[in-house]
Amino acid sequence: MSFIRTDDRTADELRQVRITPGFVPNAEGSALIEMGNTRVICCASVEDKLPPHLRGQRSEGWVTAEYAMLPRSTETRTSRETGRGGPSGRTHEIQRLIGRSLRAISNRRVLGDRTITLDCDVLQADGGTRTAAITGAYVAFAIACKRLMKDRRITKSPIINEVAAVSVGIVDGTPLLDLKYDEDSCAQVDMNIVCAGDGRFIEVQGTAEGAPFTREEMDNLLELGKKGIEQLVRLQRQAIEAAEL
């Protein structure tokens, strides 16, 4: 008997996804992404300067990210990391993942001496916050790049591909797409998949929480993830097209 999901989704079904572009009017690009009860605000900010490690080198822009869980994004209050001496190891890992994912689809030479920072703040967490952050951050990034071109600050878009991400896993022996918290917390295998819009992989993070998993199971999860990402890319395109500059 296959695993029965508490929200009645089929094993290969995404949660209800909604991407609202321009959610934060002050940012050069922004989006609110909602995947079920997981909600993340993503903002792209453009600065006409480079980080210290790139200054004085060839003219190449930088794309980076910051990530945070708001105190009541979870069932009980989580204290702010600023009050705990700085970002945790988990936060650093997720920030680097988001940044790598966006840089993988960018021609940063087009940006010149500029930095685009993607701020991803989790309003509500119900599993898959890092993958939702990547998917929403791309929309914010794309809108910011459109604004830069409209304002003639760059001559062409630095975006050379699309990027989206989704979680998959095995729960009670059943491969599942887009795990929410109650599934993620009891999964035998937990995997996050980041893909370019053309289906190529950017990053795969897969872990056996108990017994090892087979190559066949891994391949099944990768195909399941790619199916979900194809749907997310279509929703991203619609959100970017609907954005008002």
Image (cartoon, rainbow, N blue to C red):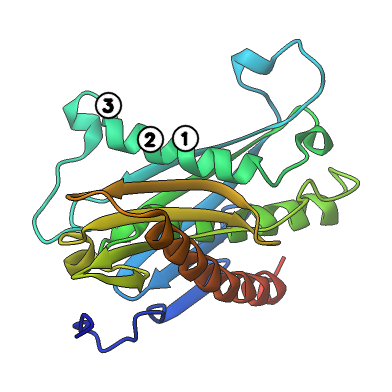
Instruction: Give the left or right position of residue 32, taking residue 2 as reference.
Output: right
User: x and y percent of residue 85 in the render?
Assistant: 21, 23
Amino acid beneath label 1: Arg
* Residue displayed at 27% across by 26% down: 86
Nearest the eye: 125 or 220? 220
**Do the CB atoms of the residues marked 1 and 2 lie less than 8 Å apart?**
yes
Q: Is residue 137 above or below residue 93?
A: below
Q: If you read the primary sequence from the N terminus, does the residue marked by circle 2 or circle 3 appear first?
A: 3
Mark pair 3, 1: CA separation? 15 Å
* Residue displayed at 26% across by 49% down: 212
Amino acid beneath label 3: Gly
Residue 232: name its quadrant.
Answer: bottom right
* Residue displayed at 14% across by 47% down: 78
Mark pair 1, 2: CA separation? 5 Å
Residue 17: name its quadrant.
Answer: bottom left
- Residue furthest to the left: 76
Residue corresponding to mark 1: 96
Q: Which mark is residue 9?
A: none
Local SS, label 3: loop
Residue corresponding to mark 3: 86
Residue corresponding to mark 2: 93
User: x and y percent of residue 20 in the render?
Assistant: 52, 73
Residue 169: name its quadrant.
Answer: bottom left
Amino acid beneath label 2: Glu
